[in-house]
Amino acid sequence: MTHSPATVVICGAGIAGISAAYHLAVKQGVQNVVLVDERAPLSLTSDKSTECYRNWWPGPGDAMVSLMNRSIDILEDLARESGNVFRLNRRGYLYATADEARIDEMRRAGEEAASLGAGAMRVHSRDGDYVPAPDVGFENQPDGSDLILDPALIRKHFPYLSERTVAVLHARRCGWLSAQQLGMYLFERAKERGVKFVNARVESVDTTGGGVRAVRLGDGTTIATENFVIAAGPFLKPVAGMIGVDLPVFSELHIKVAFRDDARAFPRHAPLLIWIDAQRLPWSDEERALFAESDETRALLNEFPAGVHARPEGGAASPMFLVLWTYHTEHVEPVLPLRFDPHYPEIVLRGLATMLPSLQTYFGRTPRMMMDGGYYTKTQENRPLIGRLPVQGAYVIAALSGYGIMASCAAGELLAAHVTGGKLPPYAPAFTLERYQDPAYCELLKNWGASGQL
Ligand SMILES: Cc1cc2nc3c(=O)[nH]c(=O)nc-3n(C[C@H](O)[C@H](O)[C@H](O)COP(=O)(O)OP(=O)(O)OC[C@H]3O[C@@H](n4cnc5c(N)ncnc54)[C@H](O)[C@@H]3O)c2cc1C
């Protein structure tokens, strides 16, 4: 069987493919866009995220901050037009440290972010004009960041943080949303403009003559098309392989835990909380002695890296909070179903208790929880791939790593501009595959600094 010909076939109905379809059909008026996915829309990685967003990204250059600022502009417009169906908030990201030596680093990060377009940094040494973030809504909020160094002010606004906390940096054009609701909103608008969804596996792509001709599906059907967009999430590499393109990407496994907080130990009104210090986990002497005895558990006594982060989930009455801490970042082959480290919930809870001592109530009696997660598929410098591929009519919107929800709107818009030959924004070259052909860029890659990954 053959489907009717499509102007564009998109492989993957995660947030990237759906945003691409939305921008092509709704914003650019492209007819006959077909989304193909072997799973239900948004069900592989895009509904497993922490659903946070930020315009807080390191350089070099302002491409990441510009992409995210544009994406957040679109998110805010969509929230306004939809009555905020996806519950965009603006609680911010709160980076906290107990290490005096890190204060200069925080200050430099704030200055760098400001210079890249994330907004000015305000330093608060004593009570002053710090404006706390509201629980809900996103309008009329400050951008940039607040660096708070006064212990009394930290205590006043964030009484739940460890008393050892010496500085917090509150990045303000940040928060979270419902990724599922956002994705479904875009998907419904796209379907209203004629986007079709085909539930099948893309098996191969006919590129006879050096250009895209047709897409063959696992159910034996074929879709004739001259434009093929790869939005395959963790399966980016094999799908690009179908058109003979080898992409420079790899994957890491990232797991998230949703804990049920019956003891009400987690602060419900908090921003996303991030502990930026490396740490040894607070085990008892007895536990320490026990873990030291076995090869399997000895690693629990090692130093763990910075970056445990958490946020409340749901409204004020919800008992849930989410925690993420990727202390292993090996490159792995994406395999399903995911495999979980049985120690993970206890480890993240202990690590989080260093920042939030009230969680010590759960030591030795881990609360009810659910683990899920997925793969960050990424490039070496943790920047996405959005643009043309070296086969006529082939495009990519992928390698969205741990920021695909927040970047999805601007990424979809950028992809649509590439496909339709529209005007490209100044940040477009930073995300094309061709960037790796620029010797100056390859030189830069040898000493790439921070990746911005949480
Ligand atoms: C634990 C965790 C926390 C995260 N937290 C955040 C966060 O706070 N903020 C944020 O912005 N991002 C976050 N992310 C990242 C974000 O979830 C991803 O970047 C994003 O979901 C990627 O979307 P995608 O559409 O590229 O991929 P996916 O959602 O994986 O979609 C790809 C789709 O392609 C389909 N597909 C692949 N191959 C084929 C084929 N051959 N035929 C048919 N279909 C195919 C798959 O079935 C899948 O549905 C997080 C990710 C994880 C794992």
Image (cartoon, rainbow, N blue to C red):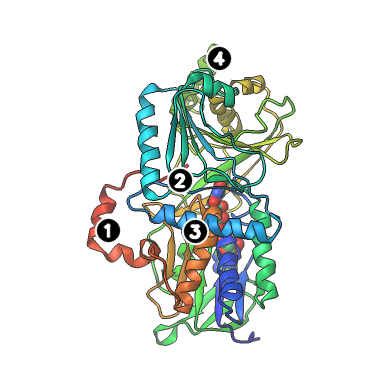
Q: Secondary structure at mark 2?
A: loop
Q: Earlier in the sequence, mark 1 or mark 4?
A: 4
> Splitting the image into 4 quarters, where does residue 183 fall?
bottom right
Q: Are marks 1 and 2 in contact (CB under 8 Å)?
A: no
- Left or right? Give the position of 176 relative to 264: left
Whichever of labels 3 and 4 marks the residue nearer the N terminus, that label is 3
Label 3 amino acid? Arg
Numbered disc 3: secondary structure: helix
First along the sequence among labels 3 and 2 = 2
| CA separation in Å, label 3 and label 4 | 48 Å
Closer to the N terminus: mark 1 or mark 3?
A: 3
Name the disc covering residue 70, or none.
3
The Cα–Cα distance between marks 1 and 4, rounded to whole angstroms, is 49 Å
Look at the image and tell me whether residue 386 can be seen.
yes
Disc 1 residue crowd, few under 14, some 14–19, many 20+, Cα 10 Å: few
| Residue identifier under label 2 | 56
Mark 3 or 4, closer to the camera: 3
The residue shown at (59%, 57%) is 75
Dot 1: what SS? helix
Furthest residue in direction top, as rendered:
285
Q: Which residue is mark 1?
A: 441
The Cα–Cα distance between marks 1 and 2, rounded to whole angstroms, is: 22 Å
